[in-house]
Image (spheres, rainbow, N blue to C red):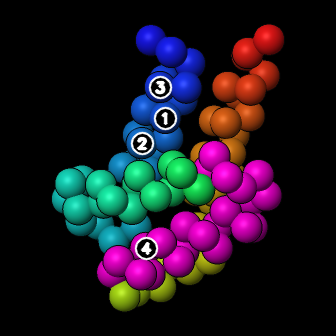
Amino acid sequence: MRKEVQTNLKLVDLLTEWNPFQLDNESYETEIADCIQAVHMYEHPLTLAKKIQSIYEFSFEKIIPLESCMEIAVELLKVMEDQDSCSI
C-alpha cells in the first residue's frame, strides 16, 4: 500500500477515535475528509486546530473548545511528521 494511503488511514483512525460530539462513527465522514485535506495544507498546530474547529462548527453548529482541537491537531501533524521522516 502506498505510504500516502497508509498515512491517510492513520489520520482517519485518529479522527474517528477523537469523536468530539460522541456520535456514531459514520456521522463524521465529511468532516474527517475535510480535516485530512487540512492536515495536508497546514503545518502549524494552531492554524490546523482553528481549521478543524471551523469544519466541525460549520457542520454541527457547535463549537469544540480550541484546546481539544489543538490536541488532535498535534496528533495529526505528528502522523504527518512520522511519514515525512520515513520517506527518503
Q: Is residue 61 left or right of residue 54?
A: left
- Mark 3 or mark 2, earlier in chain: 3
Q: Which residue is mark 1?
A: 8
Q: Label 2's element?
A: helix
Q: Are marks 1 and 2 in contact (CB under 8 Å)?
A: yes
Q: Is residue 85 magenta?
A: no
Give the residue type that dot 4 points to: Tyr
Tag 4 near tag 1, CB within 8 Å: no
Residue picked out by circle 2: 12
Disc 4 and disc 3 in contact, CB within 8 angstroms = no
The quadrant holding residue 38 is: bottom right
In the rendered picture of this protein, how many numbered marks are placed on residues? 4
Q: CA distance from mark 3 to mark 2?
A: 10 Å
Q: Secondary structure at mark 4?
A: helix
**Whether residue 72 is situated above or below residue 59 in the rendered picture:** above
Quarter occupied by residue 51: bottom right
Q: Is disc 1 placed on a helix, strand or loop?
A: helix
Q: Position of residue 87 (x, y in %)?
A: 73, 15
Q: Residues within 10 Å of mark 2 (few under 14, many from 20)?
A: some
Q: Quadrant of residue 70?
A: bottom right
Task: Report the residue at 42% width, 42% height from top.
Answer: 12
Q: Residue at x 33, y 81 (%)?
A: 60
Question: At x 37% / y 88%, what residue is drawn?
Answer: 61
With respect to residue 4, does 21 lie above or below?
Answer: below
Comes first in the chain, label 4 or label 1: 1
Between the residue at mark 1 and the residue at mark 2, the CA separation in whole angstroms equals 6 Å
Q: Name which of mark 4 and mark 3 comes first in the sequence.
A: 3
Q: Which residues are magenta?
A: 39-60
Disc 1 to disc 3: CB gap under 8 Å: yes
Which residue has dot 4 on it?
56
Marker disc for residue 43: none
